[in-house]
Amino acid sequence: MKKYTYTESKDTRSGFGAGLLEAGKKNDQVVALCADLIGSLKMQEFIKAFPERFTQMGIAEANMMGVAAGMTIGGKIPFTGTFANFSTGRVYDQIRQSIAYSNKNVKICASHAGLTLGEDGATHQILEDIGMMKMLPGMTVINPCDYNQTKAATEAIAEFEGPVYLRFGRPVVPVFTDPDQKFEIGKAWMVNEGKDVSIFATGHLVWEAILAGEKLAEEGIDVEIINIHTIKPLDEEAVLKSAKKTGCVVTCEEHNRYGGLGESIAQLLSTNTPTPMEFVAVDDSFGESGTPAELMKKYGLDSSNIVAAVKKVMKRK
Amino acid sequence: MTLENNDLKRMASQVRRDIVRMVYECQSGHPGGSLGCADYLVALYFKIMKHDPSFNMDGIGEDLFFLSNGHISPVFYSVLARSGYYDIEELKTFRKLNSRLQGHPTTHEGLPGIRIASGSLGQGMSVAIGAALAKKLNKDQGIVYTLHGDGELQEGQNWEAAMFAPFNKVDNLICVVDVNGQQIDGPTDKVLGLLDLHQKFTAFGWEVLHMDGNQMDEVVKTLELAKSKTGQGKCIMILMKTEMGAGVDFMEGSHKWHGVAPNKEQLADALGQLEETYGDY
């Protein structure tokens, strides 16, 4: 197992804030909109640097999505910022008609996704957003795993033409990816090559997969870990190649088991190379208040659950 | 093509013929609101707006129009075709398989003149505000025009947008509400009353104008007045009184023709009331 270390922990939303500032420096068409959550979305530096390119929308997300769609007409590249819940479910029809169907170059940037939002509880902990967004034709869906990857992804989507859903989170998590990485949309990242099982992980679960891989290595199990940061379009080649090699698969995501990464991979494998699979995901439930670590444990998303899933799926080979 | 008022009236008659023929041919669509708004759209595209039918999505340096109540697509399609965005013969394909003229307007099929999909109601004002903000950032002098149904104002997103625009002094924006008092299930007063729209928009910070949307001279005059008021820190809202079905006597003033196509006899009756002026497609 390749050794991953980290010297600091940071929130992925701060990676977004840093990436937005860089994107703004590189391209003066980049503009930002926020629905009364500037601090939460870490947009302060962008606003300080480019005050005229920022629009405060107030608590009016539907209007924000429409205004963002309109700003593309005239060449702007709008980045909208609010929590994942208010970036998707609350405004699904606005995104569907004014952004996705109209093919507008809007970047929907969603913080506080999933259970790790923590104490605010289930009203804010959306676990269905990946599903909703990936079902929209033409929508690119990205869920990076740490600060550096989120920063790189934010800069990459500014250069990409088309609607994007970028999902990130609230808590501080280990920073373990390369600060100078080149983020390629739709290209999976090989975290660790192995031969016994393929673990496909996205977002905060990538670090948990590494922890699981270390434990399993001690028991002589050689795991392959692949980071699927782009859920749509899925890197089918990477998934198929790995699944064929190892013969069993575990998917890991901070999302409902319905509609997420696991479902996309299951569909791909079942139509190409049927492979035993286990899903580390929330089992069709809402979340609740608690600390991120408590919630990840209670809802079955931490490294011990990945270890158990690996052992189970390997028996089914 | 720019027309003077008498020719605008003649063009509106031709557009009304297009509307009833399009809706008749596919036996679906929304003739009532389309007929009511024909004069406004003709005035915009043949007199008021600076626009280029060779069509570029960004519309830099042009005035832009956004149709929020997308179900009145027949009037939009006819006016765009008659303005030269595409051949009038394409109007034959309205609502048919493989057509660029979808039931509700969309950018998805690449039809020139369409800048956003609409149909799911209440979204157009936000989009228009966004386009107006982009023009300001681009130091573009163009003006953004809209059309909304009055029933459509029951959608909450309109009021988010209505609150946002005056607060942010989006003063290159002229919004128009088609106040025909009708919606699918009946008169707006019976379905969900809009009460005093003048007071509502004034309270939200708009400068509110009124016009009879079926009197061409008044439409032109009011739009020119509205245009003269842009760039002064105020958003302009025109409450446009129209008759649903205007120009076809048996369709006038009733919600019953909101979304119903005429039969053969009714088509003949309607066309008998509408002079062919610029040639049927």
Image (tube, rainbow, N blue to C red):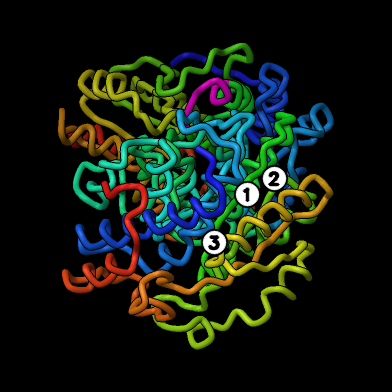
Question: What is the distance, in whole Å, between disc 2 and disc 1 at their CAs?
Answer: 8 Å
Q: Nearer the viewer, residue B160 or B14?
A: B14
> Type of residue at label 3?
His
Which quarter of the figure has residue A58?
Answer: bottom right
Check whether the beta carbons of the residues at disc 2 and disc 1 lie within 8 A of each other: yes
Have a look at marks 2 and 1 and say if they share a chain: yes
User: N-terminal of the two: label 2 or label 1?
Assistant: 2
Subunit that carries the residue with mark 3: B
> Type of residue at label 2?
Cys
Q: Nearer the viewer, residue A126 or B193?
A: B193
Residue A242 magenta: no
Badge 1: few (under 14), some or many (20 or more) residues near its Cα, within 10 Å?
Answer: many
Image: magenta residue range: A156-162
Q: Nearer the viewer, residue A4 or B135?
A: B135
Image: B20 above or below B44: below
Residue A161 magenta: yes
Q: Is residue B19 left or right of residue B160?
A: left
Q: Residue at x 59, y 14 (%)?
A: A178
Task: Label 2, secondary structure: give it.
Answer: strand
Q: Is residue B184 visible?
A: yes
**For mark 2, what is the residue?**
A34
